Image: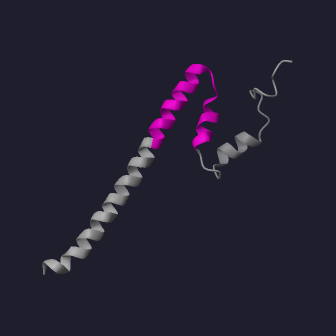
Amino acid sequence: MKEDLTFPVCITLMVLALITSVSYYHISDRKLMSQNIDSAIAKGIDPLSVRCSYASERDVICVAFAASAQSHNVASNAKK
């Protein structure tokens, strides 16, 4: 009877380990993003640009941000 339970128990443990690992990764990523946004605010950098550095390529807010004519773009406001 113990041999019958070995496979399902192993699969269950592997699935739980996978869920825990993915959750930890996402929580750590969001924590790092939060710290970087706080640092950007303190330095006067646009926090939306920091947020977009962490976003996926399908994030609508970041796509609109990149497509807009940004008045705070350093390259276009550079004095010669």
In the image, farthest residue toward the right: 80
Residue 74 image offset from top left, x and y in percent: 75, 26
The answer to whether residue 1 is left or right of residue 43 is left
The C terminus lies in quadrant: top right
Residue 41 is covered by the magenta coloring: yes
Who's the residue at 51% across and 37% down the image? 33
Q: Give the total number of marks visible in the rendering.
A: 0
Residue 57 is covered by the magenta coloring: no
Residue 25 image offset from top left, x and y in percent: 42, 48
In the image, farthest residue toward the left: 1
Helix, strand or loop for the magenta stretch, by majority: helix
Residue 18 image offset from top left, x and y in percent: 37, 59
The answer to whether residue 41 is left or right of residue 69 is left
Question: Camera-side residue: 5 or 41?
Answer: 5
Q: Is residue 1 above or below residue 32?
A: below
Q: Is residue 64 above or below residue 78?
A: below
Find the magenta span and give its range. Answer: 29-54
Q: Quadrant of residue 47?
A: top right
Q: How is the image coloured?
A: one colour
Residue 27 image offset from top left, x and y in percent: 42, 44
Q: Is residue 48 above or below residue 12?
A: above
Q: Quadrant of residue 42?
A: top right
Who's the residue at 63% across and 25% down the image? 45
The N terminus lies in quadrant: bottom left
Who's the residue at 63% across and 49% down the image? 59
